Image: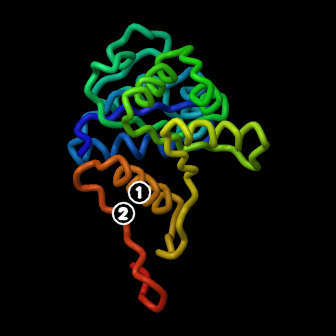
């Protein structure tokens, strides 16, 4: 079970995923360590009206992306998993090619070398060949590529409900205690 989770927020659209992930992890009692890129701050401000300070307040501890000497940059830091929500194609490419050029990508590299869970909630469509090859490379190294595609079989009634269910699935994937995504009940069953 994951008791300590690293969360990265990059400049891809979908800052709400990172924000909801931090809030839900806190509700589950999971300690969070946050790295937000400068582009991630821009997206969060544009999409949600949040600045860096507001984002950092959602985590138990936050780190500057340029602080490559922070404890997250070492395999000795005991975090069972990392989720990049959302994950830009630039960050995906850096992870896929081992470019540890900031704390977020260095921490992702540490997760891979230590064989820990790394979930990349990639955001871009349509995918070009470079995107697909980078997703393949990251997967071959042990990352989990998890585009935040909503499930509709539960008949969600709002964007917030779709985001919340996706976040719940991600938290279950990293084995956060108490994460409970809605299970598929099978054809013929009434949606929850």
Judge whether 163 appears above or below 4 on screen: below
Q: Secondary structure at mark 1?
A: helix
Tell me the distance, in whole angstroms, between the alpha carbons under discs 2 and 1.
5 Å
Counting every numbered tag in the picture gives 2
Position in image of residue 95 (x %, y %): 57, 28
Q: Are marks 2 and 1 in contact (CB under 8 Å)?
A: yes
Q: Residue at x 62, y 34 (%)?
A: 88
Q: Which residue is mark 2?
A: 181
The residue that appears at 44% across and 15% down in the rendered structure is 64
| Residue at image coords 46%, 92% | 188
85 left or right of 135?
left
- Between 47 and 112, which is closer to the camera in this rendering? 112
Mark 2, Cα crowd under 10 Å, few <14 / some 14-19 / many 20+, is some
Please tell me which residue is depicted at 52% across the width and 23% down the height of the picture.
105
The residue to which callout 1 is attached is 169
Relative height, residue 55 to residue 191 (above, below): above
The image shows residue 169 at horizontal and vertical percentages of 41, 57
What is the quadrant of residue 67 in the picture? top left
List x then y, in percent, for residue 30: 24, 40
Q: Position of residue 121 (x, y in %)?
A: 54, 44
Element type at mark 2:
loop
Question: Which residue is the extreme one toward the bottom?
Answer: 188
Q: Nearer the viewer, residue 170 or 78?
A: 78
Q: Residues within 10 Å of mark 1 (few under 14, many from 20)?
A: some
Please report whichever mark, 2 or 1, sits nearer to the chain's N-terminal start.
Answer: 1
Which quadrant is the C terminus positioned in?
bottom left
């Amino acid at each position: 079970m994951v008791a300590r989770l690293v969360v990265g927020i990059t400049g891809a659209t979908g800052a709400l995923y990172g924000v909801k992930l931090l809030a839900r992890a806190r509700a589950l009692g999971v300690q969070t360590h946050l790295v937000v890129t400068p582009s991630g701050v821009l997206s969060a401000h544009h999409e949600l009206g949040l600045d860096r300070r507001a984002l950092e307040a959602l985590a138990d501890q936050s780190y500057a992306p340029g602080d490559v000497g922070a404890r997250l940059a070492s395999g000795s830091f005991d975090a069972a998993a990392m989720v990049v929500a959302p994950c830009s194609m630039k960050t995906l490419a850096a992870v896929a090619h081992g470019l540890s050029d900031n704390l977020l990508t260095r921490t992702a590299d540490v997760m891979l070398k230590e064989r820990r869970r790394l979930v990349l909630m990639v955001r871009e469509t349509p995918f070009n060949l470079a995107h697909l090859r980078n997703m393949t490379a990251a997967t071959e190294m042990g990352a989990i590529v998890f585009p935040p595609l909503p499930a509709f079989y539960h008949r969600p009634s709002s964007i917030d409900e779709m985001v919340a269910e996706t976040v719940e699935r991600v938290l279950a994937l990293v084995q956060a205690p108490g994460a409970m995504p809605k299970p598929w009940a099978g054809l013929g069953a009434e949606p929850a």
